[in-house]
Amino acid sequence: MKYVFVGTGIAALSAAEAVRRRDPHAELIMLGREPHPFYSRPGLAYLLTGSIPERQLHLRSADELSQLGLDRRVAEVTAIDVARREVHVAGAAPIGYDRLLLAVGAAAIPPDFPGGDLDGVVQLDQLDQTRDIIARVDKARAAVVVGGGPTALELAEGLAARDVEVHYFLRGARYWSSVLDAEESRRVENAVSEQGIILHHQTKVARAVGDDRGTLDWVETEAGDTVSCQLLAVAIGVRPRLELARAAGLAVGRGIRVDERFETSVPGVFAAGDCAEVADPVTGRGAVDSLWSTALAAGAIAGTAMAGAPAGYRRPPSLNVTRLGHITTTIIGAVGGRDGDGDLLTISRGDSLSWRVQPSAWSLTGDDPGRRIRVMVGPDTLLGAVVMNDPAAARALTRLVRQRTPLGPLRDALEADPGSALTKLIALGGDGGAASS
């Protein structure tokens, strides 16, 4: 059997390893434009801060890759002919396949303002881009960072760690308001400010202005203010790469639509990682995940299915462990606003010394300035949680959310005696989700 993988990220690598385990004599060909050895994309933020050397990004040793028997080629895939089962590559003959995986990922959304193409406007998406930012830092006195999520914050912290004056533009009134509540945003912003990063709330770039050589000189905001800068780092989201799939006639929505085996609408063609759209088991709607751990798991299942072994995927509640302003933050399942849902209870612990009742939420507050827990409780189960600087609680609550553990009497106890009940809830998850007395 001949397997072709388009893409060189963790989903493609995980799929190739899964195929090899089940088909030791298969021909494995991987195609992608990046020439570098397999590397960790989440690790790029640590490379930018100088926390790790580049060699620590590498995911597999040369011996491991040799044992995999993977024919990896630096190539640009231009088209897929599903009728002929061929992949077309720029400057080379078409490559036939028996099974094909599209793991082409997602691309950073380009700047949406005039001047976004100036020399000095950068993004943190690939290793070469990270190297480019590091090379520019020595000549940069000031930088502007635009974006409301973790990647933008990674850019701001990375530049600040290299002694650049950083102005961080937030389009909204607070940081990552679609995921964090007001207290969580406040904690992150305080930690960011302590690093010397200058926060600008409700600030949008109107245009970037360069000199007569096309080099970035300054940024103007929609309010008419100007900031002189030599770097403008943009992280306003990512978009799945769908061009190849769409041109080949595969079903696409927000991503490339796949079934529980990660097979697309065309038999023999699979998709996994940031480009794949998987049905959410709760809502039934298609969802696109852009998390490293999800891509790793998806690739393994796709590779297993490609090799003909039984495989199936039920999209679990999301799990994202990240550092926000040096605060280790675990985000589990559904944590966004659900105002007006009378069956939803929100409990938070860790921002002051008392409980308080809000229009659609309960907030439990404690006296520990370093830790915080917020849980989203549905009618019968725990739907999600945000945990700051408490890894044991994060592991316990992740187990409860992912196993959809029935809460039983604890559900009512969370309203009647939330302090004690939340402790019992965490203990329940720490016990592996066994029934609570």
Image (spheres, rainbow, N blue to C red):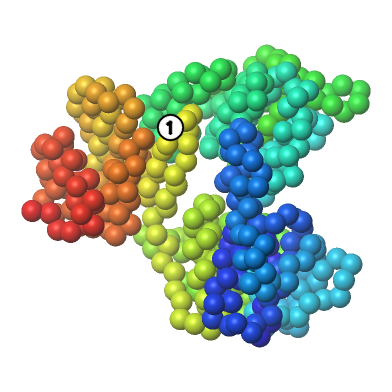
Placement of the N terminus among the 4 image quadrants: bottom right
Q: What amino acid type is highlighted by mark number 1?
A: Ile
Observer-nearest of 380 and 434 = 434
Residue 212 vs residue 21: left or right? right
Please, which residue is most extreme toward the right here? 212
Q: Residue at x 58, y 62 (%)?
A: 11
Question: For residue 144, what is the image quadrant?
Answer: top right
Please, which residue is most extreme toward the top here? 225
Q: Residue at x 24, y 41 (%)?
A: 345
Rendering coords of residue 401 (x, y %): 30, 53
**Residue 182 is at least partly visible in this image:** no
Q: Secondary structure at mark 1?
A: strand
Question: For residue 208, what is the image quadrant?
Answer: top right
Work out whether 286 lies above or below 357.
Answer: below
Rendering coords of residue 359 (x, y %): 26, 31
**Residue 412 is at least partly visible in this image:** yes
Question: Mark 1 sits on what residue?
Answer: 327
Q: Residue at x 52, y 61 (%)?
A: 296
Work out whether 12 lies above or below 366.
Answer: below
